[in-house]
Amino acid sequence: MKRYADLIADALQRVRELMPWDLRDRLAASPSPLLVDVREPAEFAQAHIAGSINVPRGVLEAACDWGYDDTVPELAGDTGRTVVVVCRSGNRSVLAADLMQTMGYADVVSLKTGVRGWNDFEQPLVDGEGRPVDTDTAEPMLASRVRPDQLRPR
């Protein structure tokens, strides 16, 4: 049986990653990449990179294709555009980028370290209303919340 970490390691054989400072440089260039944040809407509303679109991983396949309730025209319409996939820590984004490549997206990368790393690099985040989120305020929102009952039994 493959575990979550195995799936990520497998996808990393096919998916390129970039660091937050590389993303900062790419966003300053023209044309800038499309940022796709695959976290859940509540996570996205707390803090996200300005200009990113929220496409939860659970609806990603439909969002990337035409004719579905979840279709995102910006995604479905241009499989050749550079896409940077973002999540909290860089794991879900690797799996999402791998899926998008399978669906024919030519230039997809994952943000290594995710929004947490972006915040650690002290780059700007905004909330669901577009208001700036302070780096120190964002840190606990982006922290791991693994409960003891979620740890592997010994």
Image (cartoon, rainbow, N blue to C red):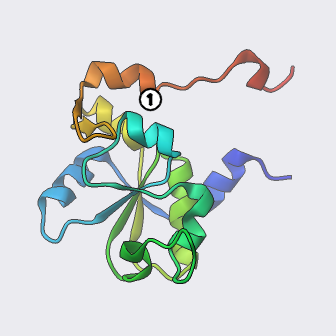
Q: Position of residue 131 (x, y in %)?
A: 22, 35
Q: In this orientation, which residue lies closer to the viewer: 19 or 83? A: 83
Q: Which residue is mark 1?
A: 142
Q: What residue is rendered at 71% in x and 51% in y?
A: 6
Q: Position of 25 compared to 71: left or right?
A: left
Looking at the picture, does residue 104 appear above or below residue 139? Answer: below
Q: Position of 119 compared to 114: left or right?
A: left
Q: Amino acid at mark 1?
A: Leu
Q: What residue is rendered at 57% in x and 56% in y?
A: 57
Q: Position of residue 102 (x, y in %)?
A: 58, 77
Secondary structure beneath label 1: helix
Quarter of the image holding residue 99?
bottom right
Residue 99 seen in this snapshot: no
Q: Position of residue 48 (x, y in %)?
A: 34, 42
Q: Position of residue 91 (x, y in %)?
A: 55, 47
Q: In this orientation, which residue lies closer to the viewer: 39 or 19? A: 39
